[in-house]
Image: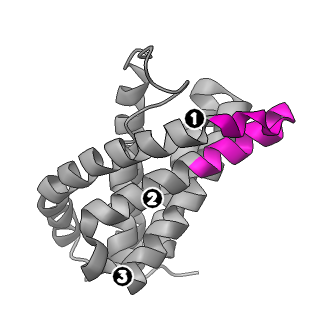
Amino acid sequence: MKTTPSAARRVALTGLLSAEAIALSALEMMIPPLPFLPPGAKPGFSNMVTMFAAAEYGLTGALPVAVIKSLFTLVTRGPSAFLMSLCGGLLSAAVMCLCFRFNRGALGLMGISVLSAAAHNLGQLGAACLLTGTAALYTYLPALLLFAVATGLVTGLILSAVFPALERQKRFLKLP
């Protein structure tokens, strides 16, 4: 099967975005746990890359980045963390894509970032409940949603600043 130049460029961009998401995820793993945050809480900086992919290419751009980032989690932190990463990443990517498709102007990057952070936390919480067999973990939901608002605002603000740099990658590969 012959690959078109635009298909090859799209694969190259997906590879670049996935590498960026993995690098940000690796940096996040270096942040020590803070005692006043919910267990396992991280800022979600790697989700900025998934959000860029969702904004530019929809679900077909965001899902590969979320899955590849989850595979990195499988290799570095094991199957339980992989399941939580995958569930959070897929739900978050779906919410991002729906928001970009139907409400981008009304919500802006900050609003979409907050909603996708909340979806990510909900996906991870659901996976944790499945893994442990207990619904008692849902008591973390208020703290996780509050944390999602804070991290969503921060990552949305950062993404607003770095969006032009991510756009330049796309232009460098001559993608529409």
Residue range in magenta is 122-139
- The amino acid on which the numbered mark 2 sits, given as a three-letter code, is Ser
Quarter assignment of residue 102: bottom left
Does 17 appear above or below 7? above
Q: Is residue 130 visible in the rendered structure shown here?
A: yes
Task: Tell me the element at label 1.
Answer: helix
Label 3 sits on residue: 103
The residue that mark 1 highlights is 73
Residue located 44% across and 68% down the image: 96
Q: Which of marks 2 and 3 is nearer the N terminus?
A: 3
The residue drawn where x is 33% and y is 43% is 150
Query: Is residue 23 shown in magenta?
Result: no
Q: Is the magenta stretch mostly helix, strand or loop?
A: helix
Residues packed near mark 1 inside 10 Å, few (<14), some (14 to 19) or many (20 plus) = many
Taking 156 as reference, is 171 above or below it? below
The magenta stretch spans residue 125: yes
Between 96 and 170, the one nearer to me in the picture: 96
The residue tagged 2 is 116
Tell me residue 70's x, y (percent).
Answer: 58, 44
